[in-house]
Amino acid sequence: MRRCAGSASALSAADPLAPCLPCRRLRRLPSVETALPRLDLRRADGYWARLLGLAGLRAVPRGQGLLLPGTRSVHTFGMRFALDLVWLDGEGRVLRVDRAVGPGQLVRCAGASGVVEVVAGESVVAGLVAGARVLCSAPASSRAVPPGESCS
């Protein structure tokens, strides 16, 4: 079993975020179908989920990320760690990756249809490079799937 960064709780195989106290906010969000097996994405749809993003969390487990569909700019105010910002086009492919964006920043990508926020360095591990397919569908229509399923 893996352990959550910044937590003594073990991560379960069924829902990797279930016992992770720092990640309680992410656990409540729907999973997103990805084309990358090393990346477990949660979708921020509601006002508060989108406003807060990953701000204020002490840590996020490796391999976890947050999708903000329909987003062309994000802020890192209130962040406790650096992020990799993976900007997606309308087909769920990577347009650009901004690596190690520190707290207190405002970052934009004019042509983006969404952004994935992951812990700094995780974009390299997950294979998130320009042109890579991240989502199985467009960012705005990314459907929720049970953990462990893959693109069909």
Image (cartoon, helix red, strand yellow):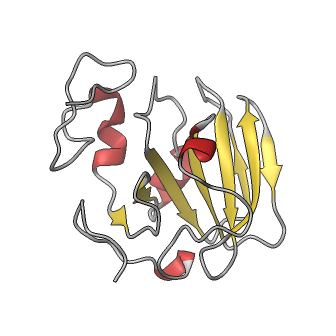
> In the rendered image, which quarter contains the C terminus?
bottom left
Relative depth, front residue between 33 and 20: 33
Left or right: residue 51 versus residue 20 is: right
In the image, residue 6 lies at what x, y percent? 38, 18
Q: Is residue 2 above or below residue 48?
A: above
> In the rendered image, which quarter contains the N terminus?
top left
Q: Is residue 147 above or below residue 24?
A: below
In the image, residue 26 lies at what x, y percent? 36, 46
Left or right: residue 9 versus residue 23 is: left
> How many numbered marks are there?
0
In the image, residue 135 lies at what x, y percent? 51, 72
Q: Residue at x 74, y 40 (%)?
A: 99
Left or right: residue 114 versus residue 17 is: right
Q: Residue at x 52, y 44 (%)?
A: 52
Q: Is residue 10 above or below residue 92?
A: above
Left or right: residue 60 versus residue 150 is: right
In the image, residue 36 lies at what x, y percent? 46, 62
Quarter holding residue 22: top left
Relative depth, front residue between 78 and 99: 99
Quarter holding residue 60: top left
Quarter holding residue 20: top left
Relative depth, front residue between 150 and 80: 150
